[in-house]
Amino acid sequence: MTAGGNRGFDARVAHPARVYDYWLGGKDNFEADRVAGEATIAAYPAIRASAQANRAFLARAVRFLAAEAGIRQFLDIGTGLPTANNTHEVAQSVAPESRIVYVDNDPLVLSHARALLTSRPEGVTDYLDADLRDPDRILELAADTLDFSQPVAIMLLAILHYIPDLDQARRIVARLVSAVPSGSYLVISHAASDISPEEMAEMIRRMNEHLAEGNHVGRPREVVTGFFDGLDLVEPGVVKVTEWRPVSAVEAEGPTSLWGGVGRKP
Ligand SMILES: C[S@@+](CC[C@H](N)C(=O)[O-])C[C@H]1O[C@@H](n2cnc3c(N)ncnc32)[C@H](O)[C@@H]1O
């Protein structure tokens, strides 16, 4: 389904989804994305491990939501290119009836959306070609698949750092949270400006040189925590994504440049 907001398909310019795919060792990227990927790796060599750690956080958070919090509806905005442990696979491995709406504005993600639409028969997955900067449109279209009178997990993983205007980012989060009932959850991971700050600043500067819109920003932990205002943070709060309910000490000690957290709407 198309909801506008597409930046158009241009393989000559790096796009966030494809650079991220390169960091993760994927094959769905072009020369411009690989050049951006190598330039950013040279500035912050741990970025590959950090991207993997973010995917592992996604899987642990979705498993927590499905298995412990009883969530059966997920709105995953900034989905990225299909990879291992996509949201619906993790959620439906716990609860096959889970309903998932994916949203991204990258045309290459749209062209790979088939791989995200492999729902278990008991559940549903849908894909919206839409832009986070238009949350009303996302909510309107997602209502075809999700029941907004029942709890929903809103997932904003490694996407809010592409909204450089902090007030706009806060308004978007507040609008999305306002649309879901008590018992819903918000999951965020976000590039940090206060973890390995010098390397990260250089990594982000290089990323912005290569992106079409040059709009990637890191934020400090207290600002990322502020996105959860009005919600009850689930333990252990906003921490390095590696430290959010890690399955092992090795996982907890791995490198990362992202803050992550999960909050419950009271
Ligand atoms: C770094 S990837 C993260 C993928 C996935 N959420 C994860 O954490 O593994 C960021 C994704 O957000 C998407 N994105 C960036 N800005 C967006 C916007 N304004 N609206 C919708 N999607 C956006 C990109 O196309 C990309 O797929």
Image: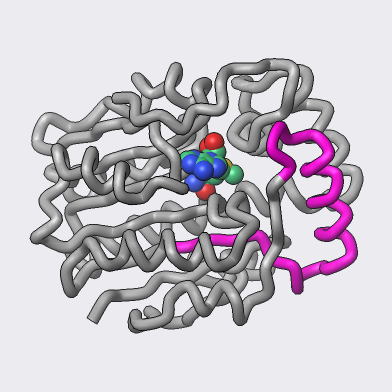
Q: Is residue 187 left or right of residue 50?
A: left
Task: Identify whether 65 is placed above or below 114.
Answer: below
Is residue 182 covered in magenta? no
Q: Is residue 228 left or right of residue 125?
A: right
Q: Is residue 254 visible?
A: no
**Residue 152 sits in which quadrant?**
bottom left
Q: How many marks?
A: 0
Q: Quadrant of the N terminus?
A: top left
What are the residue bounds of the magenta stretch?
Answer: 188-214
Q: Is residue 117 left or right of residue 150?
A: right
- Identify the residue at image location x=84%, y=59%: 201
**Residue 86 sits in which quadrant?**
top left
Q: Quadrant of the C terminus?
A: bottom left
Q: Is residue 182 visible?
A: yes
- Identify the residue at image location x=42%, y=81%: 229
Q: How is the image coloured?
A: one colour
Pinpoint residue 190: horizontal percent, then vertical percent: 59, 61
Task: Identify whether 248 is placed above or below 29.
Answer: below
Is residue 196 covered in magenta? yes
